[in-house]
Image: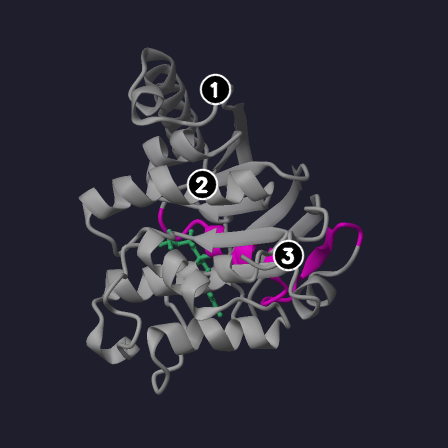
Amino acid sequence: MGRDPDHPPAVVCTGLAKTFEDGTEAVRPVDLTVGAGQTIALVGPSGCGKSTLLRMVAGLEAPSAGRVAIAGRPPAETLRRAGLAVAFQDPSLLPWRTVRGNVRLALRLARRPMDDADIDHLLALVGLAGFEETRPAALSGGMRQRAAIARALSTRPGLLLLDEPFGAVDDLTRRQLARDLPRLWEARGTTTLLVTHSVSEAVRLSDRVIVLSPRPARVVAEIAIGLPRPRTEAIGESAQAAALTRQIFAALSDGMASPATAGPAS
Ligand SMILES: Nc1ncnc2c1ncn2[C@@H]1O[C@H](COP(=O)(O)OP(=O)(O)OP(=O)(O)O)[C@@H](O)[C@H]1O
């Protein structure tokens, strides 16, 4: 399926902070490093600033302070070189194109060749076999989200940014995606930064979990997930995984107990 990505990049965020124009302080200076080829999960209470942080890494939101370096370069440059792909909560599929057409366009823009059989293989992997010719309006929210994930993976990015990638997906499909998709990005050595509301999913997928405080987001704990790979369901349900899950919940409650004073909410 196309060529291998460029060397997966490391991401370094230094003093990254965001206060919106209306005074809402979303992110307190955050230092964060994602090693090349690592998968890092961001977890934190709802509205704490996770998406804002991810959008700054993607170059879609300008930081108020600090900087992001992806393989030493600014995000916009990585985006332009198609080394970065995003799948966010609200999938921005083109409504007049079919599912396959949306993936095809991303590939064309990224100048990465892939034939329709390979596209369909990827669509089958995210459970969209039979919907290749369907337009987004005729898909459920979860299906649209899966189409956006397939589109993001199709260009074989070196860096993958996922915001609640399985948020609108039913539990059974979510479980299946959490099993199958990481195999793809692990096999390619993709550097992956994802936001999830699910602590068990964070444990299952990542090498390290970053626990954020309530808004404004600051890092309250970084927990290394030393579980073996591939992460089978049995590993995800092991006593070791359960202990890590408890540790993350404890860090989340510690963060809740010591919120920082924040600027006004929007
Ligand atoms: N453009 C904006 N202008 C002003 N405030 C904003 C803007 N975008 C987000 N916010 C505010 O910043 C805060 C953080 O939002 P963000 O979406 O990053 O949180 P989140 O942790 O991703 O939330 P959730 O878990 O519910 O998806 C929220 O209070 C939100 O209302």
Is 193 rendered above or below residue 110?
Answer: above
In the shown orientation, is residue 116 left or right of residue 8?
A: left
- Nearer the observer, disc 2 or disc 3? 3
Q: Amino acid at mark 1?
A: Pro
> Is residue 69 highlighted in magenta?
yes
The residue furthest bottom is: 96
x 67%, y 62%: residue? 64
Instruction: Tell me residue 150's x, y (percent).
Output: 42, 60
x 20%, y 77%: residue? 138
Residue at numbered disc 2: 182
Residue 90's disc is none
| Disc nearer the start of the sequence (1/2) | 2
What SS does tag 3 mark?
A: loop
Q: Which residues are magenta?
A: 46-72
Residue 228's disc is 1
Snapshot colouring: one colour
Instruction: Tell me residue 223's x, y (percent).
Output: 52, 24
Q: Amino acid at mark 2?
A: Pro
Residue at numbered disc 3: 3
Would you call the spot at circle 1 few (<14 residues within 10 Å), some (14-19), or many (20 or more)? few
Would you call the spot at circle 2 few (<14 residues within 10 Å), some (14-19), or many (20 or more)? many
Q: CA distance from mark 2 to mark 3?
A: 18 Å
